[in-house]
Image (cartoon, rainbow, N blue to C red):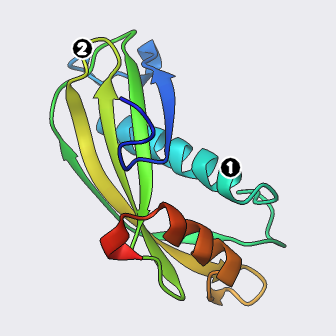
Amino acid sequence: MSEDDGWPFSTVDRVRFGDLDAMQHLNNVEFLRFAETARIAYTQQLVPDFSPIERSSFGYVVAENHIAYRSPVGFGEEIRTRVRPRRPDEKSVRMDFEMHAEGDGRLIAEGHAVLVGYDYGEEAAAAIPEEVRERFAADAPPDDR
């Protein structure tokens, strides 16, 4: 898989023993953690001064998560999580993700999160800065720009 196939960014995580559930599969919570890690790293690449822990700069909150589990994952597997923005507008952007096993390429999970711009000082939804929206739009599929 390459970054030139409509997915502008990816990360790779190895499944740790503590990531497993009682059935020795990747716990459902960890899927969302891997997707979140990829989203944050992508945003940091796109907006270098973005910090997920600073409340004085651009920020967003997760308004919705959706995930479809496609294949179980076991201890030690490496998982590539690919992300891409969809439908950026004034206050929100949908961030799609796909997870694939590095070993055999099988689809592990797919889904999306809806991210809403947020002003931590005002404790309210806010517009995503125009330059950030433009960067999301540049990476979005052509029909979503």
How far is disc 2 from disc 1 in space, using C-alphas?
28 Å
Residue visible at 46% across and 73% down in the picture = 93
The amino acid marked with disc number 2 is Asp
**Residue 129 in sight:** no
Tell which circle, 2 or 1, labels the residue nearer the N-terminal end. 1
Residue 70 locus on image (x, y percent): 15, 36
In the image, which disc is placed on residue 63? none
> Relative to residue 60, is residue 96 depicted above or below?
above
Residue visible at 35% across and 11% down in the picture = 75
Residue visible at 54% across and 89% down in the picture = 90
Quadrant where the C terminus lies?
bottom left
How many numbered dots are placed on residues in this image?
2
Residue 102: name its quadrant.
Answer: top left
Residue 105 locus on image (x, y percent): 25, 21
Q: Residue furthest left?
A: 70
Residue 116 locus on image (x, y percent): 52, 77
Residue that label 2 marks? 104
Residue 1: name its quadrant.
Answer: top left
Which is more toward the observer, 128 or 125?
A: 128
Mark 1 neighbour class, 10 Å CA radius: few under 14, some 14 to 19, many 20 or more: few
Residue 30 locus on image (x, y percent): 40, 36
Q: Is residue 62 left or right of residue 43?
A: left
Q: Secondary structure at mark 1?
A: helix
> Relative to residue 116, is residue 30 depicted above or below?
above
**Residue 92 in sight:** yes
Residue that label 1 marks? 45
